[in-house]
């Protein structure tokens, strides 16, 4: 009987803590200034550039093509090579080669880093040791000095503590989250609120999440309301023009990528005239 009472009191304390923390985080997020996070009217970014086949993804040519077509930013897959102590542009390991050779992130920055934004999908970020993390941060800082590129880099990762090291070093971070669709009503709200807590206490720049299915969204109306004070980067947005227009109008959606493993060009769409 005593054990049951202790369990009951513990559950009451847990639930109470959850609601108090949720209220506190929402209150603080509503006051927080996120003006240093990307907030341009050109929200449609590119995923790995504009390409015709898998081998052209994440290349200087495909990314340059996306920039030429009007994309303000691009999502790029990167890995930190411990032996080389350098960043490699590649989704997979062994590395995906471009024009017969491994592409270093420094080479991509040198070619195209003058005035655009880079969303770095950092593969296996969580697997680096603390020293390797510091080495990676220093290398990223070293290769992004030209034209203050480091101010236009967003490092994405799922591991909030490791990711916070990049934020502490002055880089922008995307806390990548994986909420469930809104159709799972109570679970969806619970998970979103927990992610908000981690996002707030980690002091990250923006929250990243998948839009979900067109008819079963993760980022539907309820989630949009829950995240109204959080800058959001969306990915895997369904290829639907009406939906793209809707997301352009959502104030806290700062950038988004259309499609999943498909090359599409909606870079002409923006919200630049909305408030003019």
Image (cartoon, grey):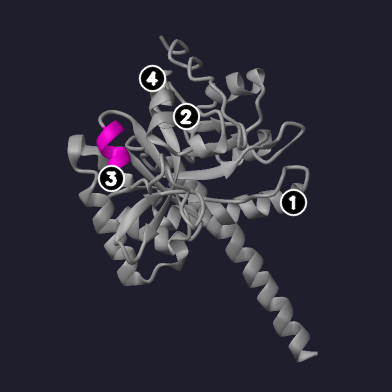
C-alpha separation, residue under disc 2 versus residue under disc 3: 21 Å
Q: Earlier along the polypeptide chain: callout 4 or callout 1? A: 4
Q: Nearer the viewer, residue 117 or 244?
A: 117
Split into 4 quadrants, where in the image is the N terminus?
bottom right
Tag 1 residue: 186
Q: Callout 3 environment at 10 Å: few (<14), some (14 to 19), or many (20+)?
A: some
Closer to the eye: label 4 or 1: 4
Residue 258: name its quadrant: top right
Tag 4 residue: 68
Query: Which percent across, then down, holds residue 67?
Result: 39, 24
Q: Residue at x 48, y 20 (%)?
A: 267
C-alpha separation, residue under disc 2 versus residue under disc 1: 32 Å
Q: Residue furthest right?
A: 1
Tag 3 residue: 106
Q: Nearer the viewer, residue 109 or 179?
A: 109
Tag 2 residue: 45
Q: Residue at x 69, y 49 (%)?
A: 180
Residue 197 appears in the figure:
yes
Closer to the eye: label 4 or 2: 4
C-alpha separation, residue under disc 4 versus residue under disc 1: 44 Å
In the image, residue 1 sits, relative to residue 30, either above or below, namely below
Q: Residue at x 47, y 12 (%)?
A: 274
- Main secondary structure type of the part rendered in magenta: helix
Closer to the eye: label 3 or 1: 3
């Amino acid at each position: 009987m005593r054990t049951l009472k202790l369990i009951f009191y513990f559950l009451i304390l847990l639930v109470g803590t959850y609601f108090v923390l949720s209220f506190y985080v929402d209150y603080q997020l509503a006051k927080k200034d996120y003006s240093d996070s990307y907030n341009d009217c050109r929200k449609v970014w590119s995923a790995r550039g504009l390409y015709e086949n898998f081998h052209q993804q994440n290349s200087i040519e495909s990314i340059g093509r996306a920039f030429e077509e009007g994309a303000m930013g691009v999502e790029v897959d990167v890995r930190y090579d411990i032996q080389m102590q350098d960043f490699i542009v590649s989704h997979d390991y062994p590395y995906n080669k471009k024009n017969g050779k491994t592409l270093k992130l420094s080479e991509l920055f040198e070619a195209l880093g003058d005035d655009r934004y880079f969303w770095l999908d950092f593969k296996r970020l969580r697997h680096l040791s603390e020293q390797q993390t510091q080495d990676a941060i220093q290398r990223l800082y070293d290769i992004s000095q030209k034209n203050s590129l480091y101010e236009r880099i967003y490092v994405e990762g799922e591991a909030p503590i490791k990711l916070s090291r990049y934020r502490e070093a002055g880089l922008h971070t995307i806390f990548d989250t994986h909420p469930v669709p809104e159709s799972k009503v109570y679970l969806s709200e619970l998970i979103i609120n927990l992610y908000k807590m981690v996002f707030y206490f980690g002091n990250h720049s923006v929250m990243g999440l998948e839009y979900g299915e067109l008819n079963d969204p993760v980022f539907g109306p309820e989630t949009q309301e829950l995240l109204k004070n959080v800058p959001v980067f969306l990915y895997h947005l369904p290829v639907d023009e009406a939906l793209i227009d809707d997301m352009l109008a959502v104030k806290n959606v700062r950038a988004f990528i259309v499609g999943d493993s498909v090359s599409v060009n909606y870079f002409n769409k923006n919200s630049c005239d909305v408030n003019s």
